[in-house]
Image (tube, rainbow, N blue to C red):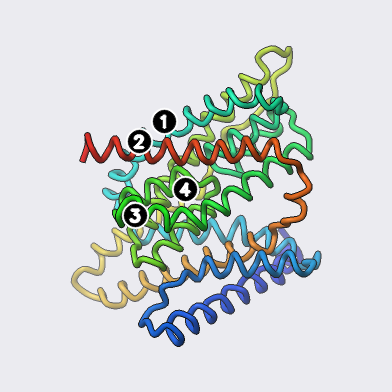
């Protein structure tokens, strides 16, 4: 990228930051000034995505902002997730991962089986069903975009699948934090596992975890949800070749795919930040610890700002009219996929509660 190409993304990044700032201001006015709390009980991330959706659908977003908004949804989001690693210790990552992996596998298999059963009933095109399936089970839009070339999906099928995942992901992102708090009685481990396995997009999981943290003062839930989702993302390495084989097994020519290209490398950045935090804790144990803690807090703040900016960018980029124009049958599949992964996640966590904890 030349410096001119970098300059192109600045307007969209600035717009996302402005919406973050406005959302934070509204949050403080309503939660602190009007309701009288010391800290607002309302989520800034929720304000940002709803305000972004309002602006993006009432006004036409200029082309000059689009590249920057896309950059924010992709790279600023990933930087925010990497910075989240500063809140964790290595043993916590391994502990949460050991609990999350069986849950993830069960959810993926269950959704694939259910969607396989209903696509014949509704006569959904096979490629569309594959895209919705992998988007629902692994990591939303990223999984759809990575799968599309290996099953030769056309542009309209990809757009439809992304709209499907976006719609139900946003709904679950806004509803699940409150539902999970009620259902699991505020247990941060179970709520984090549920959010990390039942919501489609990495950005949506991060937003749901952030909403829960801001609403119920539980950073641990945000950490667990993030770890669970990042582990879930790595299943792309298994699912893309599997889908390529299943789709192309009756054809003479199989599509090429690259594990190197589809692997979510920002997961490694997240792990590196965990290690950095723990090395810092040891290095500054005897001197400079206050400065180190201040640095950690600043990185945590940067993470939340970046994540909220990404939520604003997603809201601005969500076109409700386009979603409405796409018909209902694939959305039935998407809804059933969302419901299935949510129900299976709850049932598996209930099994954990009764037999493992």
Residue visible at 72% across and 71% down in the picture: 11
Query: Residue 15 or 4: which is nearer the viewer?
Result: 15
Front: mark 1 or 2: 2
Front: mark 4 or 2: 2
Query: Residue 292 or 163: which is nearer the viewer?
Result: 163
Tell me the crowding category of disc 1: few under 14, some 14 to 19, or many 20 or more residues within 10 angstroms, Cα based: some
Residue visible at 70% across and 68% down in the picture: 12
Q: Name the residue under label 1.
A: 106
Q: Name the residue under label 2.
A: 348
Q: Name the residue under label 3.
A: 275
Task: Check contact, mark 1 vs mark 2: CB within 8 A.
Answer: yes
Residue 58 position, x and y percent, is 75, 68
Give the distance between the C-alpha atoms of the residues marked 3 and 2, in whole angstroms. 31 Å
Front: mark 1 or 3: 1
Q: Counting residues from the N terminus, which is met first, the one under dot 3 or under dot 2?
A: 3
Residue visible at 42% across and 58% down in the picture: 178
Give the distance between the C-alpha atoms of the residues marked 1 and 3, in whole angstroms. 30 Å
Give the distance between the C-alpha atoms of the residues marked 1 and 4, in whole angstroms. 22 Å
Task: Check contact, mark 1 vs mark 4: CB within 8 A.
Answer: no
Q: Counting residues from the N terminus, which is met first, the one under dot 4 or under dot 2?
A: 4
Q: Counting residues from the N terminus, which is met first, the one under dot 1 or under dot 3?
A: 1
Task: Check contact, mark 1 vs mark 3: CB within 8 A.
Answer: no
Q: Can you tell which mark lies on residue 267?
A: 4
Give the distance between the C-alpha atoms of the residues marked 1 and 2, in whole angstroms. 8 Å
Give the distance between the C-alpha atoms of the residues marked 4 and 2, in whole angstroms. 25 Å
Q: Would residue 45 be found to the left or right of residue 165 on screen?
A: left
Q: Would residue 272 be found to the left or right of residue 60 on screen?
A: left
SS for callout 4: helix
Residue 41, picture quadrant: bottom left
């Amino acid at each position: 990228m030349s410096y001119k190409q970098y300059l192109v993304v600045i307007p969209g990044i600035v717009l996302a930051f402005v919406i973050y700032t406005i959302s934070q201001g509204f949050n403080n006015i309503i939660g602190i000034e009007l309701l009288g709390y010391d800290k607002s009980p309302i989520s800034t991330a929720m304000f940002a995505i709803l305000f972004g959706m309002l602006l993006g659908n009432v006004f036409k977003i200029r082309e000059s902002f689009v590249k920057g908004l896309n950059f924010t949804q992709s790279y600023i989001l990933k930087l925010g997730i990497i910075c989240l690693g500063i809140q964790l210790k290595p043993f916590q990552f391994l502990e949460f991962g050991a609990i999350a992996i069986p849950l993830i596998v069960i959810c993926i298999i269950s959704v694939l089986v259910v969607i396989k059963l209903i696509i014949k009933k509704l006569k959904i095109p096979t490629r569309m069903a594959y895209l919705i399936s992998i988007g629902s089970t692994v990591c939303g839009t990223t999984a759809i975009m990575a799968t599309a070339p290996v099953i030769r999906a056309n542009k309209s099928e990809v757009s439809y699948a992304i709209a499907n995942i976006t719609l139900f992901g946003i709904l679950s992102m806004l509803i699940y934090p409150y539902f999970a708090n009620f259902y699991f009685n505020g247990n941060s481990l179970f709520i984090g596992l549920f959010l990390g396995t039942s919501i489609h997009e990495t950005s949506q999981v991060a937003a749901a975890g952030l909403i829960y943290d801001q609403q119920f003062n539980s950073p641990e839930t945000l950490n667990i949800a993030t770890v669970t989702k990042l582990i879930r993302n790595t299943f792309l390495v298994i699912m893309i070749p599997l889908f390529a084989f299943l789709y192309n097994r009756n054809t003479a020519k199989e599509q090429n795919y690259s594990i190197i290209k589809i692997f979510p490398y920002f997961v490694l950045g997240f792990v590196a930040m965990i290690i950095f935090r723990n090395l810092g804790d040891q290095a500054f144990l005897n001197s400079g610890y206050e400065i180190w803690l201040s640095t950690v807090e600043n990185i945590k703040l940067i993470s939340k700002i970046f994540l909220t900016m990404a939520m604003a960018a997603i809201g601005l980029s969500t076109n409700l009219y386009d979603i409405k124009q796409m018909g209902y049958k694939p959305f039935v599949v998407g809804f059933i996929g969302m419901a299935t992964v949510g129900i299976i996640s709850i049932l598996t966590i209930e099994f954990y509660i009764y037999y493992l904890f």
